[in-house]
Amino acid sequence: MSSKNDQYARHAGDWTDKSYADATGYLAHRAELIAKLGPRLEPGEEVLDLACGDGGLGKLIVARGLRYRGVDATPEMVAEAQRLLGDSASIELGDLNEYAPPAPVAATTVFRAIYYARDRRAFFAHVAAFTEKKLVFDLNPRQYRPDDVAAELLAAGFGQVLLRPFFVPQTVALPRLVATGAKALERSGPLARLALRIRFTYLVAASTN
């Protein structure tokens, strides 16, 4: 087991709580954009969450009336997600590069893990084969050029690519009014793009039509 996988195994029991200063606020905003950015998801549709970790996002997806299927490559994370979500979700062991669901899903998500794709364009094409509405993932524009990633998505068969700044911080819990202001800044155009030169990420929604 690699040192990274060993880290995931050791911290599976408190992964979400230790990863986010305000886990509920952060993940609720992520779940909202998964549902609304690009083609809207309707109640009862299924979200496949690749590299799901301990399933912390799953609670917020299920709360929106969506079905949740989580997949992770670390057995300890899978066990924790199964404990956390119980019968409200399907959780499986699998590698994001190879896993395919038993039936097509409305949306596929990949968070804090796109760099685990061995061949990003091939991964996008793989996901497009079983995703009916959209692929949603986070993208650090200081690590990957958004134009390059968008071109790869279009080449893989996705018809439209939307990028939405995501300004709710992972490691700082914001007061409610400040959090509301941060979300408003996500739609501020040039100011948002300026902030992304320094920190924060995009949420990418690549739709299939």
Image (cartoon, rainbow, N blue to C red):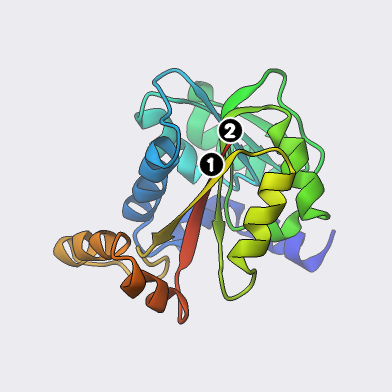
Using the numbered discs, state the Cα–Cα distance from disc 1 to disc 2 in whole angstroms.
Answer: 8 Å
Question: Percent from the top left, x then y, of residue 152?
Answer: 71, 52
Reading the image, the residue beneath label 2 is 82
**Which quarter of the picture shows residue 41?**
top left
Is label 1 in contact with label 2 (beta carbons under 8 Å)? yes
Specify whether residue 113 is in view: no
**Which quarter of the picture shows residue 145?**
bottom right
Callout 1 secondary element? loop
Reading the image, the residue beneath label 1 is 55
Q: Nearer the viewer, mark 1 or mark 2?
A: 1
Question: Percent from the top left, x then y, of residue 114?
Answer: 67, 56
- In front: 41, or 190? 190
For badge 2, the amino acid type reads Gln
Q: Residue at x 53, y 41 (%)?
A: 55
Q: Residue at x 43, y 62 (%)?
A: 20
Q: Residues within 10 Å of mark 2 (few under 14, many from 20)?
A: some
